[in-house]
Image (cartoon, helix red, strand yellow):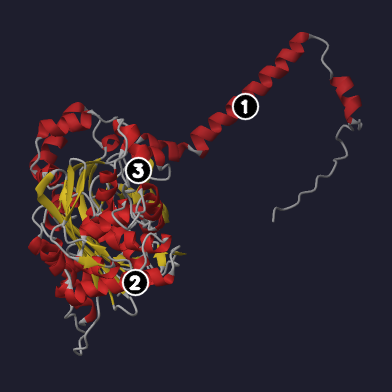
Amino acid sequence: MRPEYSISMLENEEYIPEYNSAELFERLAPNTPFVWFGWIMFFITVVMLGRLIDLQIVKGAKNFFLAEGNRIREIVKPAPRGIILDRNNEPLVKNVVRYSLALVPGDLPKDSAARHDLITKVASASGLDAPDLERQIGQARNTSFDPIIIKDNISRDESLGLEVALGEEPGVVVQKNPTRDYLANGFSHLIGTIGKISKEEFATHPDYAITNWIGKSGVEAFYEDKLRGRDGGTQVEVNARGQVIRLIGEAKPQKGEDVTLTVDTKLQEAGMQALRAIAKKGGAIVALNPKTGEVLALGSFPDYDANVFLNGDSKAIQSIFDDPLHPLINRPVSGAFPSGSTIKPFWATAALAEGTISEHTRLDTSAGQITVGAFQFNDWKTHGVADVRQAIAESNNIFFFAVAGGYRNIKGLGPDKLATWAKKFGLSEKTGIDLPGETNGFVPTPAWKKKKTGERWFVGDTYNVGIGQGNLLVSPLQMSRALGAVATGQLATPRILKDDKPELKQLDAPAHALEVVRDGMRMAVTGGSAHQLQDIRTKDGKLVEVAAKTGTAQIGSDVSKTHGWMEAFAPYDDPQIVVVAFVEEGGEGHATAGPIVKAMLQNWFGR
């Protein structure tokens, strides 16, 4: 509390009469411009004197230190990202320290000779080229305090050695920042990777620093907002050599949110191991829970080591980009391929629902071919008289030519209804999975053909769509989702993030139609083209009833090149899992995709 002072009048002091403010101003008011000028000069002198006192006395010491090179600096402390775990809480990545050697241009010696000597010393200690360092630093503003990394991803031992050799030098910093170590084998397309933020990304992410890392693909990209931490930092005072002399304030970095996925590591590894053993050009695996849409496994071949993109080996990175098999393509999500006969259960459902056929409709397919004008549409073998269940089980092309485009006693769905039902099964649109880069697939129509080629639609075009050929393109993920709808009557949105609420849509198809189709797929296992799946057993030896469909898709006009497919769900009476395997240029589906599906089902039920 400030003291109060009192003032007393001495007897011999001259009495000064009191005036109010108006009277005082009137008595003292100047009568000439010279008096006004004097008052103005008086006030200017007072202000200048006060400023001089403030600079020389009050702030003199502080300004002296600043003149000596002391600066206030904010040092960013990057936050670690959240951990990605599988459905059983097994970590798929971990955070590790990344060591880097950096220079701060604004802290380097201003004298050119001293700067040259320092850069020469840094080059000698780090094994770098001094002229290259000179050019690199020369491109930056001399007043910039943003560190320029000159040697990235160095070992811990090397970082310690550099700190000993260069730790006292102005403008030289050994950085320790968090980065990733991808642990899981075969998850590269699913998990994705991180990388340094690009100029384009930086422009659309105003709350990022240009030195930040960001998710580039997979879960790392899709769930960037969850996984990304919040950087912290310290505000410090540094001297002319860039050395910290005082801590002013600190904000601790906040780790990103952990993300738990729906995938099962053991199932994923079993599928990828089988896929690698068989596929030569490429392939994909997908496993879903058809009741919830949970993605239990999702893998693409060839895959790649995601750590390569973090290690900074430019040759290794370029070899991935140059690989003719395109390992960066996420085939189950982004790839679009002709489906072959795996499409037939969906067309059978459509034909039964539309009344194009009934479960009792029978067609004599013993000719093994249909001739339309100058064109022949052949089956892969002769089947005799068949109904829809038998046609699914034996993959009867003639029957499905008729279902799609009409033949003898079957009128056929026609291209418009095929397109409508493709959409109902989600085949001509994105599934909505929480991963980037998804394809729409493609279902051709007469309008599309007219616009694209100027030609009209022929019945042969419909026949091709009826057996999953021609311009029809689907992704393995779309096929797994559509098969889940056959298995349960509901179309589930695939999802990677665990505990997300399931998104289910009732398939607009009669329950009995789906039952007939499931019967046909079960018959494909008990006595048809998917017979290798009839011996899937639980851990205690109990038989698991599986329903399945094989597919062999011709690639373009080359009959010698085919993709192999197999799709399956189990158990037959209470579907818990859908599995789809695709082998690019693998030949017949039962021979190439079949063993992969078998390995995955056995892994799932045999635990």
Mark toward the viewer: 2 or 3: 2
Residue 261 can be seen, yes or no: no
The image shows a total of numbered marks equal to 3
Element under disc 1: helix
Identified by mark 2, the residue type is Val
* Discs 2, 1 touching: Cβ within 8 Å: no
Q: Say which mark, if any, is on residue 445.
A: 3
Mark toward the viewer: 3 or 1: 3
Q: Is residue 451 above or below residue 401?
A: above
Residue 424 can be seen, yes or no: yes
Crowdedness near tag 2: few (<14), some (14–19) or many (≥20) residues, C-alpha within 10 Å: some
Mark toward the viewer: 2 or 1: 2
Q: Is residue 549 left or right of residue 573?
A: left
Q: Residue at the location (27% across, 48% down)? A: 472
User: Residue 537, percent across and down?
Assistant: 19, 83
Identified by mark 1, the residue type is Val
Q: Marks 2 and 1, how far apart in space?
A: 97 Å
Q: Residue at the location (39% across, 55% down)? A: 421
Q: Marks 2 and 3, how far apart in space?
A: 28 Å
Q: Say which mark, if any, is on residue 270.
A: none
Element under disc 3: loop
Crowdedness near tag 3: few (<14), some (14–19) or many (≥20) residues, C-alpha within 10 Å: many
* Discs 2, 3 touching: Cβ within 8 Å: no
The disc, 2 or 1, on the residue closer to the chain's N-terminal end is 1
Residue at numbered disc 2: 516
